[in-house]
């Protein structure tokens, strides 16, 4: 949703206060047939460059894409806030 000071993200999957909005990337295990979350990461959507948002917003055939480096420096699933360079946003 556009505002005077940039986009404000809304929707079922969007969490956080204005200016700190994020999407969860959830890690889980289904080895016993049931979902069990063991870790999650926050993809900070307010970090997306406004120019990318504008390009995606003007063309219904293009979408914002996040490429996330899924493992941290210790080889574990990435968690906590995910910001550049661990995430790269683009429009495709």
Image: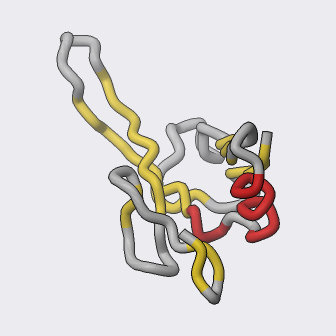
Number of marks present in the image shown: 0
Q: Position of residue 74 (x, y in %)?
A: 59, 43
Task: Name the foreground residue: 40 vs 20.
Answer: 20
Q: Position of residue 90 (x, y in %)?
A: 78, 48
10 versus 2 height, above or below: above
* Picture colour scheme: secondary structure
Q: Identify which residue is drawn at 48% across, 75% down.
A: 20
Task: Name the foreground residue: 24 vs 70.
Answer: 24
Q: Identify which residue is drawn at 50% across, 66% down.
A: 9
Q: Identify which residue is drawn at 63% across, 88% down.
A: 4
92 versus 3 height, above or below: above
* Quarter of the C terminus within the rendering: top right
Q: Position of residue 65 (x, y in %)?
A: 69, 43
Outermost residue on the bottom side: it is 4
45 versus 30 height, above or below: below
Q: Position of residue 88 (x, y in %)?
A: 75, 50
Task: Name the foreground residue: 92 vs 3.
Answer: 3
Task: Name the foreground residue: 5 vs 72.
Answer: 5
Q: For this view, does 66 lie left or right of residue 78? A: right
Q: Identify which residue is drawn at 30% across, 38% down.
A: 38
6 versus 59 height, above or below: below
Q: For this view, does 50 lie left or right of residue 37? A: right
């Amino acid at each position: 949703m556009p505002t005077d000071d940039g986009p404000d993200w809304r929707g079922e999957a969007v969490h956080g206060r204005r200016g700190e909005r994020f999407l969860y990337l959830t890690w889980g295990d289904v080895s016993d047939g049931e979902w069990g979350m063991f870790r999650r990461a926050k993809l900070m959507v307010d970090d997306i460059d406004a120019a990318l948002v504008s390009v995606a917003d003007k063309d219904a055939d293009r979408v914002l894409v996040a490429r996330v480096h899924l493992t941290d420096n210790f080889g574990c699933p990435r968690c906590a806030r995910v910001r550049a360079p661990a995430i790269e946003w683009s429009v495709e």
